[in-house]
């Protein structure tokens, strides 16, 4: 656990001051911890931009800096089984449930929170992945022109439970829902990411959109008064 603590501490400490051209994703699953990063620029600059984080992080078992085309970077980040699926996606049927939480700049996950998370991943009856997206410079754009309110976030945590058969569904959904409610109330901010739709999320209007929800309702009413574009958590035409 010492290396896990050290990596999270590096995320918390160095993350806010990283080069704005860097976006990082850390993935934590049972028995495995990895980071994938994307930098807009040459490999030599990427190495230099990552020096501060790597100096604080535990020594990795392996690391590499690859210079890729845009297409190749999409292939790498999508984790497709082969590059042709990026252009012509193939459906691989599976079931999943996702939860999302935000950790704000200046806070970070505590060691207690990390212990709770790791214990859950190791003991879960379903396959669960936790990913941590450390945002680049665009997160620093503080304005009201976007429905993305999470400008104080250091990183977003996405947790995803996967299973193969219908029979497993109720157990896996309940397992991650129960964990998510307790974890968010104790260790993260109140907000959740609206692009990771969570149909079981309470008070989603505020968790997704905060104080701008009413303004979004006004916009919806103006441009889609008949609510043609709708789903269970879409913006309504009236409150």
Image (spheres, helix red, strand yellow):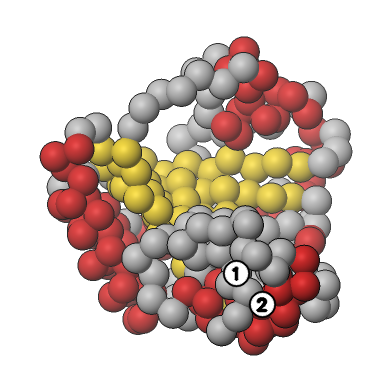
Position of residue 27 relative to residue 207, above or below, is above
Residue in view at x 39 percent, y 69 percent: 201
Residue 87 visible, this angle = yes
Left or right of 164: which side holds 226? Answer: right
Left or right of 155: which side holds 188? Answer: left
Element marked by disc 1: loop
Do labels 1 and 2 touch, CB within 8 Å?
yes
Q: Residues within 10 Å of mark 1 (few under 14, many from 20)?
A: many
The numbered mark, 1 or 2, whose residue comes first in the sequence reads 2
Residue in view at x 56 percent, y 58 percent: 230
On the image, the x and y values in percent for residue 127 come to 26, 42
On the image, the x and y values in percent for residue 13 come to 60, 70
Provide the residue designation for mark 2: 217
Q: Residues within 10 Å of mark 2 (few under 14, many from 20)?
A: some
Quarter of the picture holding the C terminus: bottom right
Left or right of 110: which side holds 207? Answer: right
Q: Nearer the viewer, residue 18 or 84?
A: 84
Residue in view at x 18 percent, y 51 percent: 170
Residue 31 visible, this angle = no
Position of residue 171 relative to residue 94, above or below, is below
Residue in view at x 70 percent, y 29 percent: 73
Provide the residue designation for mark 1: 235
- Tell me how far mark 1 sits from mark 2, CA to CA: 6 Å
Left or right of 117: which side holds 143? Answer: right
Quarter of the picture holding the N terminus: bottom left
């Amino acid at each position: 656990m010492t290396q896990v603590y050290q990596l999270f501490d590096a995320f918390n400490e160095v993350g806010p001051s990283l080069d704005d051209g860097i976006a990082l994703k850390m993935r934590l699953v049972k028995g495995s911890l990895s980071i994938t990063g994307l930098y807009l620029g040459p490999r030599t600059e990427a190495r230099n931009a990552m020096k501060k984080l790597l100096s604080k992080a535990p020594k990795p078992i392996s690391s590499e800096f690859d210079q890729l085309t845009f297409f190749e970077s999409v292939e790498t980040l999508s984790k497709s089984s082969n590059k042709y699926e990026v252009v012509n996606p193939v459906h691989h049927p599976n079931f999943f449930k996702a939860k999302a939480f935000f950790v704000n700049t200046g806070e970070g996950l505590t060691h207690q929170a990390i212990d709770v998370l790791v214990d859950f991943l190791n003991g879960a009856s379903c396959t669960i992945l936790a990913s941590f997206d450390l945002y680049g410079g665009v997160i620093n754009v503080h304005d009201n022109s976007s429905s993305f309110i999470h400008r104080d976030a250091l990183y977003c945590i996405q947790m995803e439970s996967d299973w193969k058969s219908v029979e497993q569904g109720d157990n896996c959904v309940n397992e991650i829902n129960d964990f998510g409610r307790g974890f968010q109330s104790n260790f993260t901010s109140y907000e959740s990411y609206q692009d990771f739709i969570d149909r079981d999320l309470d008070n989603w209007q505020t968790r997704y959109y905060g104080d701008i929800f009413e303004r979004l309702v006004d916009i919806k009413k103006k441009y889609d008064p008949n609510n043609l574009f709708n789903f269970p958590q879409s913006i309504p035409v009236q409150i």
